[in-house]
Image: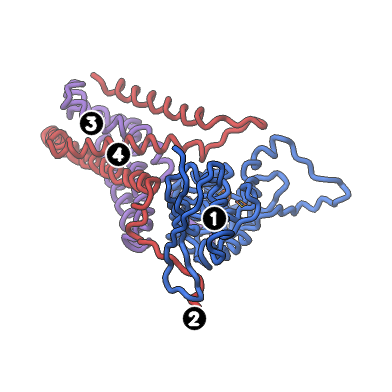
Amino acid sequence: MSRETIELVVFRYNPETDCEPAYQRYQIPYHHDWLVLDALNYVKDHLDRSLSYRWSCHMAVCGSCGMMINGEPTLTCKAFVRDYADSIRIEPLANFPVERDLIVNQDDFMSKLASVKPYIIDTDDVPLSEGEELQTPAELAVFDQYTGCINCLLCYSACPQYSLSADFIGPAALTLAHRYNIDSRDDGFRQREERVGSDDGVWQCSFVGACSEVCPKGVDPAAAIQQGKITSAAHYFKKHLMPWSDS
Amino acid sequence: MSSHKPVFWALFAAGGTLSALLAPVLIFLIGFAVPLNLIDPEALGFARVSGALATISIALTMLVIIVLFLWHAAHRLRVTAHDLGWFPDSVAVVLFYGLAAAGSVASGWLLIGTT
Amino acid sequence: MNTGPLVRQISRRQWWLGASRYRRYMVRELTSLFIGAFAFALIVGLWRLSQGAQAFSAWLDAMHSPAGLAFNGIALAAALYHSVTWFNVAPKAISVRIGTFKLPDSIISGAHYAGWLLVSILVLYLVRV
Ligand code: SF4
Ligand code: FES
């Protein structure tokens, strides 16, 4: 079937003039090799310069172009228009406040991410002169998949617990906490555990599994969080049943 | 602050695994095997069941099954109460964990009676 | 006028109706209602057992009455759904690594399914007359 044009139904919201969001329809040419992001760029370049949205890399690396396409959290630079029907609905990522049109406010995620200390905490005081801290391929393999996260927030947009519990740290940040906890060079587990093992951390997760289904990078946050629960529970029982142990 | 959910989560996870392995066959056995004439009604008769439950190991197995099924269900329903806004978490804790605790005590007491 | 960022409200009671993955999740969670109810049915059975042969067979009859069978049917369907969903996601919680080799998810799920089959056969074998 050859298609001449398609329709984009785009969520519009301008905080300076609107109290309510509205949907605007754009007829655009159909190209077999266009991404949904290309379709949006066509609108911006040829039809409506006021349309606001974020993107940068056009290759699923920067993580800035996530939106709801027909209700599903998706990277618009990783979704071809040919895979959709003739009318495509585009909305800002669910579960985040909308700044304008398709742009969401990420402050909540940013502060939660920072709160789990997503970096190597090295307290064993080995001087730099001893050389670099080496890691075997097996030690790398343990956390490698979790390093693929591009902070696109699709997982937050898919996660019901994030929308139901304002303080829930959420999938990507908990995954990064786990990624550093299981890094052989890291000693920061206990510093992170105060947040990760709290009611706002892994224990708010009810394993819906939506995060892993929508993640564009195969990070599998649901797996990281379930394994984080096991680690956190082991730590809890050790602390309470064997208070003399150093944990 | 560290959460106390690990205690209930551990019971939930153990009960989830045990019920995933055992619930279908037990429901089938007790619910359908006799009406479908697949086993002799005597297999589930009073004499055989009370005889079996007089053995400590079998009574204990029964206890573990009932208790873990209950705590599995209680924890999941607590989460569902939160998911659907049925009532505050504190109410869900008292209601569902309370029911599971009452059921655990009752089955323990009844099984002491059979042994 | 500047209304600032727009916060979209979700319905606390109905959010899960919006997508099939949420509906499946809610069904999965509600299977626990039947696991719990079945456990209570067993407790009632133990109680009737303590009252003697007649009471116990009345309990069995109730389990095999039309209403009892209807409950058993729904509970069995719920239990099967619980088992399948539980074993399918087991590989997320259990990660087995030997060096750089990671045991495939299908092996971990498969082992659970095999265990399920074995346990079920074992129970049927032990109870048969
Ligand atoms: S875990 Fe996946 S979906 Fe979530 S932010 Fe990272 S890359 Fe995006
Ligand atoms: S534009 Fe960079 S991820 Fe899509």
Residue identified by numbered label 1: A40
Q: What residue is shown at x 46% (from left), y 59% (from top)?
A: A10
User: Which circle marks residue C78 in the picture?
Assistant: 4
- The reply to the same-chain question for discs 1 and 2 is no
Contact, CB < 8 Å: mark 4 with mark 3?
no
Whole-angstrom CA distance, mark 1 to mark 2, is 28 Å
Amino acid bearing label 4: Ala
Amino acid bearing label 3: Ile
* Earlier-in-chain disc, 4 versus 2: 2
Residue identified by numbered label 3: B30
Residue identified by numbered label 2: C1
Q: What residue is shown at x 36% (from left), y 61% (from top)?
A: C12
Foreground: disc 4 or disc 3: 4
Whether residue A242 is visible, yes or no, is no
Position of C64 relative to A129 (above/below): above
Q: What residue is shown at x 30% (from left), y 29% (from top)?
A: B25
